[in-house]
Image: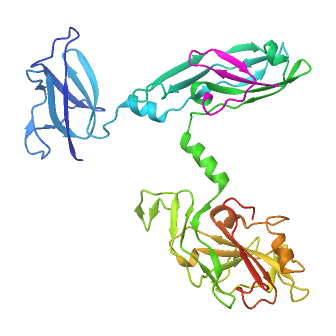
C-alpha cells in the first residue's frame, strides 16, 4: 500500500500544547505498534512510540488507513491518507431533508378523525441560509396521536409536515419543492363525513438513495439521448442508423473491460447499412443477422405469418437499439402484430392499439424507430411504400 503523511497538533484539556509528549500509534484493528517512516520513500523508519515536537505537532508517514493514536491518557482515531474528507461538509452536501426511519401513519382505533403517527427520526438540511456552512438538524419525534383540526375536518385532503423542531403541522397545500427542503413531509390524509377514509405516508425517504435511483431508471427503461436516427439506405429494403448516444443504466460502466467515468451513457458509431436480427413477441432463439426489412410477414399471436390482403396491406415494425460496442448485437427489429388496409392506416395506428414487446427487447433496448411498410414494398425511401417514424423519448411501443 502507498504511504501517506499524518501531521496534526495536540494539546491538553487546559489548552497547553502537548509538546514533547510520547505518542503510540496502532493500526485500527491491531494491538501491535504500527510501522512508521520519516518520508514517502519508506526507507528510514521512525520509532514507535515517538514524540510530538516542541509545538505539539505529531508527524509521521504510514500506510494509508485508520489508526489509533494514544497520547497521555487520551486515544484518538485518525485517518492517514485519502480520503481527505470533512465529514460535516460531506453530510451537508449529500444528506437531504426527509425521514430516515419511522413516521408511518394509521387511523386511530378510537377516533375516526385522528391519526396515529409512529415515532420517527429525520433530518432537516438548510443549505440556503449559509451555503458555506449549511445546518443539519436531526429531528427525533415520539409516537403521537393527532386529531384533525377544524380546518382539516372542513376539507377533504390534508398534508402532514414537520419542521426542524419536531412540530407537526396540518395544511391544505401540497408541499412544493421549497417546503420539501425546509420541512419533513410525512403524508396525506383524506376524510369525509366525519371519518378518515384514506391515509398515504409519502415521505422523502433517506434510506438507500442508490437503490431509489435504480427503482426510477428501471421503471423508465433505457432511452435515447441523441442521434440513432433510422433512415432508408436508398431505393431498397435496407436501413441506415446514425451515430448516437443512449441512456442505459450501467451499460457503459466498463468499456471493453476498462472502467469509465461515464457509466450510464453509451455511444454508438452508427451503421450504413445497418444489420439486425428479427424477433417475434416470444422469440427464444433469435434468427441470424440480416440487413433487409422483411415486409412480407408479421407476428400473429407469436407465429410468423404471411401478410395477406391487397398490395397496400401494411404492418408496423419496431426497431430496437442496444447500447453495446458489438455491432452485430446493436439492433433488433420486432415484427408488427397487426395488419392494416393501407400505409396511412398503419401510420395512424402507431402508438395505439395492442402491441406486445418482447420482454428482453423492451427491458434492455431503446425504441428508435417505427417502420410502417406495405407488404409489397421494394423501396423504403418511397413514401407510398414505407414511412420511418422516430418515436418520442418515452414512446409507447
Residue at left 62%, top 60%? Answer: 222
Quadrant of residue 305 within the rendered picture:
bottom right
Residue 231 location in percent, x, y? 65, 79
Q: Position of residue 378 (x, y in %)?
A: 74, 91
The residue that appears at 76% across and 71% down in the rendered structure is 282
Q: In this view, does 273 lie to the left or right of 339?
A: left
Would you place residue 326 above or below residue 364 in this image?
Answer: below
Q: Please say whether residue 281 is one of the residues in the magenta stretch.
A: no
From the viewer's perspective, is 154 left or right of 98? right
- Residue under the image location 20 percent in, 11 percent down: 15
| Residue 283 versus residue 176 in the image, above or below | below
Magenta part of the chain: 157-179
Q: Which quadrant would the C terminus be assigned to in this image?
A: bottom right
Residue 306 visible in the shown view: yes
Whether 170 is among the magenta residues is: yes
The residue lying furthest to the top in this view is: 14
Residue 173 x %, y %:
73, 27
Asked whether the viewer can see residue 300, the reply is no
**357 or 155: nearer the eye?**
155
Looking at the image, residue 69 lies above or below residue 353 = above
In the picture, measured across the screen, residue 326 lies left or right of residue 200, that is left
Q: How many marks?
A: 0
Amino acid at each position: 500500500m502507498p504511504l501517506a503523511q499524518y501531521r496534526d497538533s495536540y494539546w491538553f484539556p487546559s489548552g497547553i500544547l502537548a509538546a514533547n509528549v510520547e505518542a503510540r500509534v496502532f493500526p485500527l484493528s491491531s494491538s501491535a505498534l504500527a510501522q512508521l517512516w520519516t518520508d514517502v520513500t519508506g526507507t528510514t523508519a521512525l520509532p514507535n512510540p515517538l514524540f510530538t515536537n516542541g509545538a505539539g505537532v505529531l508527524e509521521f508517514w504510514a500506510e494509508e488507513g485508520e489508526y489509533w493514536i494514544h497520547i497521555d491518557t487520551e486515544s484518538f482515531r485518525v485517518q492517514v491518507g485519502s480520503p481527505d474528507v470533512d465529514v460535516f461538509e460531506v453530510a451537508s452536501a449529500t444528506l437531504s431533508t426527509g425521514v430516515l426511519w419511522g413516521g408511518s401513519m394509521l387511523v386511530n382505533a378510537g377516533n375516526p378523525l385522528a391519526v396515529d403517527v409512529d415515532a420517527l427520526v429525520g433530518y432537516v438540511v438548510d443549505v440556503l441560509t449559509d451555503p458555506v456552512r449549511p445546518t443539519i438538524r436531526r429531528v427525533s419525534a415520539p409516537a403521537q396521536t393527532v386529531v384533525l383540526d377544524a380546518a382539516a375536518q372542513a376539507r377533504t385532503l390534508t398534508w402532514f409536515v414537520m419542521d426542524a423542531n419536531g412540530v407537526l403541522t396540518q395544511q391544505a397545500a401540497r408541499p412544493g419543492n421549497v417546503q420539501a427542503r425546509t420541512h419533513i413531509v410525512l403524508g396525506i390524509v383524506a376524510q369525509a363525513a366525519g371519518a378518515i377514509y384514506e391515509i398515504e405516508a409519502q415521505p422523502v425517504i433517506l434510506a438507500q438513495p442508490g437503490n431509489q435511483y435504480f427503482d426510477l431508471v428501471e421503471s423508465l427503461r433505457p432511452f435515447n439521448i441523441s442521434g440513432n436516427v433510422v433512415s432508408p439506405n436508398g431505393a431498397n429494403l435496407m436501413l441506415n442508423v446514425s451515430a448516437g448516444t443512449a441512456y442505459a443504466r450501467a451499460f457503459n460502466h466498463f468499456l471493453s473491460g476498462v472502467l469509465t467515468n461515464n457509466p450510464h451513457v453509451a455511444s454508438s458509431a452508427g451503421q450504413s447499412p445497418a444489420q439486425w436480427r428479427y424477433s417475434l413477441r416470444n422469440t427464444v432463439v433469435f434468427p441470424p443477422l440480416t440487413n433487409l426489412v422483411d415486409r412480407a410477414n408479421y407476428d400473429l399471436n407469436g407465429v410468423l405469418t404471411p401478410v395477406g390482403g391487397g398490395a397496400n396491406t401494411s404492418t408496423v415494425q419496431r426497431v430496437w437499439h442496444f447500447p453495446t460496442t458489438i455491432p452485430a448485437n446493436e439492433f433488433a427489429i420486432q415484427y408488427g402484430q397487426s395488419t392494416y388496409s393501407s400505409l396511412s392506416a398503419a401510420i395512424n395506428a402507431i402508438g395505439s392499439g395492442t402491441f406486445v414487446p418482447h420482454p428482453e427487447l423492451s427491458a434492455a433496448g431503446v425504441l428508435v424507430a417505427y417502420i410502417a411498410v406495405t407488404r409489397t414494398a421494394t423501396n423504403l425511401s418511397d413514401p407510398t411504400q414505407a414511412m420511418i417514424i422516430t418515436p418520442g423519448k418515452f414512446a409507447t411501443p
